[in-house]
Image (cartoon, grey):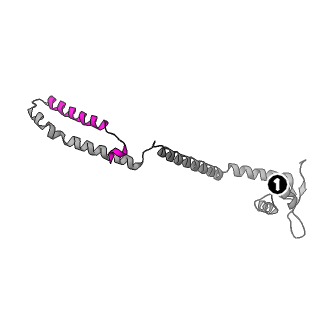
Amino acid sequence: MANSKHVNRTELSLIFGKNVSTIDQWIRQGMPYIEKGSKGTGWIFDTSKAISWREDKLKDEVFSPERIELDEAKRRKIAAEAAILEIELQSKRRAVLSREEVEQSLTHTFITLKQRLRTIPERLAPQILNENDEQGVRELLLNEIDDALLELSQLDFNASSCQ
């Protein structure tokens, strides 16, 4: 390798712009060396092999499943936070109803429907008794149900009117 140079730990740390303790950590992780250091003898590294090893490690870190899962988790968290902020903004603009407002509105609607439907027999009983044919009774009931549904469709669903 033409660009290969033999260096010690300190020189290698300068090449990578890291401190010597980082080089020691990389050695424990498997960074290749030419000669192991000991008392009185320094470590010797082939720069091209060390750089190649480091590039491979960085590629592994970037494309590792754990990294992808972490990136995906971060992306989802950011998306969720953005969605929450969007809902809060819409709520402040009154574009979104609260659960309580929907419940109040539905309760009001169902109470009105129940009251309207329960009065049908009382209102129609005299007419039904005077009606001789089945078709006439059906028409009376359908007209009354349609009137009840029309009344419901005209209700004001603002939460303040439901209280």
Whether residue 143 sits left or right of residue 42 in the image: it is left
Residue visible at 59% across and 51% down? Answer: 73
- Give the overall secondary structure of the magenta segment: helix
Q: Quadrant of residue 46?
A: bottom right
In depth, the one of 53 and 11 nearer the eye is 11
Residue visible at 29% across and 44% down? Answer: 110
Answer whether residue 154 is magenta in the image. Answer: yes
Which residue carries the number 1 mark? 16
Q: Quadrant of residue 36?
A: bottom right
**In this view, 36 is above or below 117:** below
**In this view, 133 is above or below 20:** above
User: How far across and down, in percent of the image, does residue 74 sit?
Assistant: 61, 50
User: How far across and down, in percent of the image, does residue 82 sit?
Assistant: 56, 46
Whether residue 149 sits left or right of residue 88 in the image: it is left
Answer whether residue 21 is magenta in the image. Answer: no
Residue visible at 15% across and 32% down? Answer: 137
Q: Which residues are magenta?
A: 135-163
At label 1, the amino acid type is Phe
